[in-house]
Amino acid sequence: MNALIVYAHPEPRSFNGAMRDLAVQVLTELGHDVRVSDLYAAGFEAAGGRTDFTDLEDPEAFRYQREQIRASQAGTFAPQLMAEIDAVRWADLLILQFPLWWFSLPGILKGWVDRVFAMGFAYGYGETHSSGPLRGKRAMLAFTTGSPAATYSASGANGDLDRLLFPIQYGILHFVGMDVLPPFVAYGAARIDNNGRTEYLRDYRRRLETVEHAVPLTFDVADTASRSD
């Protein structure tokens, strides 16, 4: 299996960094090929625009999706962006590793989605969800939160986590055709002791060791997700 980890944290020594390193170690030990796309280290630009392309179909009136379609067909994405797209093509499993900021992806990771999941490559012409171009691939969120687990429930201060993740898991990953695996969440990682962090890494190791056999989530239009079993 080819596994791509897209890492979106500015500090390599963070707990997100520890999760990334563990994923590389475990998946490699299991015989999988692993690549890491470290967005901060690479200076990845979050904002899409004219510089996404080596040349433009219409330099006078910039139409982003039209240029994405053309670049998907002609291979005229900028080199850094083309490398990310090729990595997604290569991957059987995509892991997004990040801290949950403002109930969503960090801006640099959302920008990666905007630019890499380009129209003509990851979606378009009615090809979404079950007919999405990236069907057959698997994706999983692995992230930390600032608040404890109890706050991410229907009665908690931050609301039900499945509903919070719906725009990411369904609106992005499932939209392009991927099978979305249950997320791995390290709640309140910055506020727990070393024993708690060690336990999270132990649990994450177990999750990674069985990731090939994980049952994908199922979704409904009521903005909820659940295991298909």
Image (cartoon, helix red, strand yellow):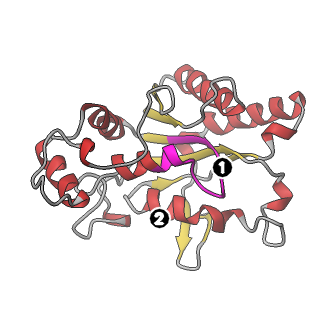
| Residue in the picture at 64% in, 68% down | 163
* Type of amino acid under label 1: Leu
Name the side, left or right, on which 158 lies relative to 105.
right
Name the side, left or right, on which 101 lies relative to 195.
left
Residue 39: percent from left, percent from top: 48, 33
Q: Which residues are magenta?
A: 95-110
Q: Which callout, 1 or 2, points at the residue further toward the start of the chain?
A: 1
Badge 2 element = helix
Q: Which mark is residue 100?
A: 1
Q: CA distance from mark 1 to mark 2?
A: 17 Å
* Type of amino acid under label 2: Gly
Residue at far bottom of view = 222
The answer to if 18 sits in the magenta stretch is: no
Find residue 15 and report its image quarter: top right
Q: Which mark is residue 171?
A: 2
Q: Residues within 10 Å of mark 1 (few under 14, many from 20)?
A: some
Residue 227: percent from left, percent from top: 62, 62
Quadrant of the image containing the N terminus = top left
Quadrant of the image containing the C terminus = bottom right
Q: Residues within 10 Å of mark 2 (few under 14, many from 20)?
A: few
Residue 111: percent from left, percent from top: 44, 48
